[in-house]
């Protein structure tokens, strides 16, 4: 009996030793990213999206396996809260209003400013949204640009997709659109056929540090993401290269 017990204890010890030396299995996370340009349900290819490239870099440092899902900006927080996504990968402003929905935010990964978009045939070189008082000005639904338009006294019209703005400008439905400075990449690089332009005289009034978002209860994942983001910032090459390529700005935080 004692020999059997010694043998059993020996086997248990070997098993525990093997378990201690085996690499931990990577955590799989579901990440929502804005759909590829011109689509509603396709994940952007690597090398064509700031957030796809960024999440790949973060995942390799945090030991995460990523499942990308194409989810519009305005539905990502709801997806995280509902458990359909683990991470919302868009430039979210970390507001208390959003925290009240049940999410928390990582350290900032990019910064944005507002930019003013007009139709190619519009000769106006507006310096501010206030120059468009009593005109209709478009913005993406769920963005901080909505408040900026209202505060300037212009009429607000919202759209679910950034590429809905070009037809609205062409038809005269809106006179201009307030968008993110990062939308320059979409219109100037990916879709120069949209017949829109950015007004050079426009002076940005809002600078927004953007963060990833996770469920408020998922503190372990938040800690992993923040550590990986800090590592990227310390390395000092990947994040600046991504922000420059995709027309984002480096965050202050």
Image (cartoon, rainbow, N blue to C red):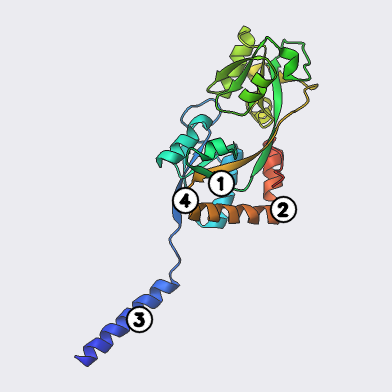
Q: Residues within 10 Å of mark 4 (few under 14, many from 20)?
A: few
Which one is in front, 147 or 69? 147
In the rendered image, which residue does mark 1 sit on?
55
Mark 3 to mark 4 CA distance (whole Å): 33 Å
Chain-order first, disc 3 or disc 4: 3
For the residues carrying marks 3 and 4, which lies nearer the camera in this image? Answer: 4
Question: Disc number at residue 218?
Answer: 4
Q: Residue furthest top?
A: 172
The image shows residue 149 at horizontal and vertical percentages of 66, 20
- Snapshot quadrant of residue 243: top right
Quadrant housing residue 185: top right
Question: Which circle's residue, 1 or 3, is located before the other in the chain?
Answer: 3
SS for dot 1: helix
* Location of residue 249 in the rendering, given as x and y in whole percent from the top left corner: 71, 39
Q: Which residue is mark 2?
A: 236
Secondary element type, mark 4: loop
Who's the residue at 49% across and 53% down the image? Answer: 219
Question: What is the secondary structure assignment of the residue under circle 3?
Answer: helix
């Amino acid at each position: 009996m004692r020999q059997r017990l010694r043998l059993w204890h020996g086997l248990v010890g070997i098993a525990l030793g093997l378990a201690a030396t085996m690499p931990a299995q990577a955590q799989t996370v579901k990440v929502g990213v804005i759909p590829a340009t011109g689509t509603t349900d396709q994940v952007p290819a690597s090398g064509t999206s700031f957030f796809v490239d960024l999440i790949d870099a973060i995942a390799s440092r945090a030991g995460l396996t990523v499942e990308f899902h194409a989810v519009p900006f305005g539905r990502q927080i709801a997806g995280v809260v509902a458990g359909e996504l683990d991470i919302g990968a868009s430039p979210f402003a970390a507001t208390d209003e959003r925290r009240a929905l049940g999410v928390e935010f990582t350290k900032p990964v990019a910064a944005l400013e507002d930019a003013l978009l007009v139709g190619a045939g519009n000769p106006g070189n507006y310096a501010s949204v206030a120059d468009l008082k009593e005109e209709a000005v478009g913005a993406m639904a769920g963005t901080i640009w909505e408040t900026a338009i209202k505060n300037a006294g212009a009429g607000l019209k919202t759209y679910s997709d950034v590429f809905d703005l070009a037809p609205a400008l062409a038809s005269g439905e809106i006179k201009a659109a307030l968008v993110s400075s990062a939308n320059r990449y979409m219109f100037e690089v990916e879709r120069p056929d949209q017949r829109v332009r950015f007004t050079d005289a426009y002076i940005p009034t809002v600078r927004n540090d953007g963060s990833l978002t996770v469920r408020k209860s998922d503190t372990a994942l938040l800690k992993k993401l923040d550590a990986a983001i800090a590592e990227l910032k310390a390395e000092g090459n990947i994040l600046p290269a991504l922000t420059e390529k995709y027309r984002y700005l480096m965050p202050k935080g």
